[in-house]
Image (cartoon, rainbow, N blue to C red):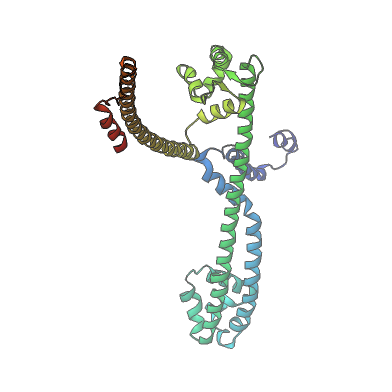
Amino acid sequence: GVLTQWVMAPAQMDVEFLQMFTVLRALRLIRLARAVRLIPSFKEMWLLLRGLTDSLRTLFWTMVIIFCVLYVFAIAATEMIGKHESFQDDEAVQLLFGDLLKSMLTLLQVMTLDTWADTVARPVMDKLPQMAMFFVFFITVAVFVLMNVITAVIVENAFAIAKEDEEQQAKMKERQKAKELEALREMFMEIDEDGSGELTTEEFLAAIKNEKVKRRLMVLEMEEGELEEVWNILDNGDGTLTVDEFTQGLRKMNGEARSKDILEMLKSLRKSVRDSVHLVDKIENMECTLVSMHEDVGEVQRDMGILLQVCRTLQATFTQAAANMQQRPPSAPMTTPKAPTGLPTAAKTIAAG
């Protein structure tokens, strides 16, 4: 760099020690991982790097707590084992527990469960069997409790990082959605020539012939032959499109169908099936009603026919009586005209009906 070539080299200063700092250039990979974190294939890599960097503070306090635990137990081990008269001449035990530092390193080995029983505990228990309780208590505190708590904290931190990353991705998607809706809204305003806030079929078909609008629609992964079909898909039957119908519809058509969209479609289909079944029931009830009305009309028609026959019979009777009265001489006695034979039969039919 500039420092080594133009400053330190002319001054005949040793620059070899600076070469170790070139390893820090690998940290630039974190910037690369941050740039590709939204790509699904690199999500796990970003979570690992984010968890590693965010766990540094947790790792620091973990080392502090482990040091404190080792320090306390090392003091006890040095006093009870290293300075015990039974191990004054034992070089192996003095190598393990001769002073505080050696005791801390030995207990760190025990904490990692690295051959602690054969190389550490059993040589001490041969002369001091009661020290078994010391090693059991240390493993219980340092391994079973402390290390599991540290693992739980790190795992919880990883979950928090993953949740925070998901929230950030959701916010970025919302911002992207807002940009897309704004772009579609601007496209709507350009297509809406009369400024009414609604698109008609003529305006839309005229707009897709515009090269600028056609390119924008094709950016949304729509083929040129499918542009005329877009109107039939977006239109809900009223022949016009509002801003929300246009923007939301085009945005949903962009990309693959999501589970939410599929569920909404299934919900609409179920509603349509229920409405169709209800409509079929109404049609069947109406058909039954029409059949009943047809039967009633038939009965009324038969009654009207019988009544018409009775009226005709009465008309004939009265006509015959009037004719007889006109032909009768003034001195002739009054005679009751004979009713036609069809009248009692018609009357009986009406009474029976």
- Residue 99 visible? The answer is no
Q: Nearer the viewer, residue 180 or 49?
A: 180
User: Across the whole image, how many numbered discs are drawn on residues?
Assistant: 0
Q: Nearer the viewer, residue 227 or 27?
A: 227
Spot occupied by residue 42 in the image (x, y as percentages of width and height): 52, 41
Spot occupied by residue 323 in the image (x, y as percentages of width and height): 32, 16
The image quadrant of residue 213 is top right
> For the N terminus, which image quadrant?
top right
Locate residue 234 relative to residue 291 in the image: left or right.
right
Q: Nearer the viewer, residue 316 or 257?
A: 316
Spot occupied by residue 126 in the image (x, y as percentages of width and height): 48, 85
Q: Residue at x 67, y 43 (%)?
A: 18
> For the C terminus, which image quadrant?
top left
- Residue 168 visible? The answer is yes
The image quadrant of residue 13 is top right
Q: Residue at x 62, y 48 (%)?
A: 164
